[in-house]
Image: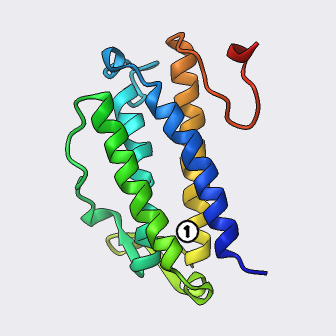
Amino acid sequence: MKVIPLLQKEFENEGRTTRKFLKAVPEDKFDWKPHEKNRSLLQLAKHIADLESVIEVGIHKDEYDLSEKTDNSGSVESSEELIDLFDKNYKASMTALNKAGENDLLKEWTMRNGEQVIAEMNTYGIIRQTISHINHHRAQLGVYLRLLDVPLHDSYGPTADDR
């Protein structure tokens, strides 16, 4: 059995759902936070859009060092820019996944913060973990949107807003 087609289909399905959630983010509430310790709505949405690029990083690089992380995605000032960022990152990761071979999934990969190793796994692991991480934050975004009384899109079935 080939694994890459399964990952492609999953990433495509999850990407479609994530894009719907990001499109629902109201510009006039970008600065809203449910609690002082939380990210703002825009910070969370932008983080989700940025995470879409991690699969490409996992395929093309052997490690990711958080201490060297710089925000290459620039600022997001509008809903349109948020969706553009998501689309750009999604496309780059899907392109990398489409070009990857089955053996590329076995390559060892490390996440670190300077000298501190946070995680070591193969490329398959980082792809799976990235999809899960995006889904985690998408669910968090769903809570934000619900608290703002924004109708929710379906993820894996109908929502209360579909009734």
The residue that disc 1 covers is: 126
Q: Is residue 51 above or below residue 29?
A: below
User: Foreground residue, 9 or 143?
Assistant: 9
| Residue 25 as seen in the image, left or right of residue 121 | left
- Total count of labels: 1
Q: Residue 34, position in %: x, y? A: 46, 18
Q: Is residue 154 above or below residue 109?
A: above
Q: Quadrant of residue 121?
A: bottom right
Question: Is residue 112 visible in this depiction of the protein?
Answer: yes
Quarter holding the N terminus? bottom right
Q: Residue 109, position in %: x, y? A: 49, 79
Q: Residue at x 23, y 57 (%)?
A: 70
| Residue 73 as seen in the image, left or right of residue 19 | left
Q: Residue 132, position in %: x, y? A: 62, 53
Extreme right residue here? 1
Quarter holding the C terminus? top right
| Residue 162 as seen in the image, left or right of residue 22 | right
Could you say whether the residue bearing mark 1 is in a helix, strand or loop?
helix
For disc 1, the neighbor class at 10 Å (few under 14, some 14 to 19, many from 20) is: many
Q: Residue at x 58, y 24 (%)?
A: 143
User: Foreground residue, 17 or 58?
Assistant: 17
Question: Is residue 55 visible in this depiction of the protein?
Answer: no
Q: Is residue 99 above or below residue 119?
A: below
User: Foreground residue, 81 or 113?
Assistant: 81
Amino acid type, residue under disc 1 in the picture: Ile
Q: Residue at x 35, y 16 (%)?
A: 29
Q: How is the image coloured?
A: rainbow
User: Foreground residue, 140 or 53?
Assistant: 53
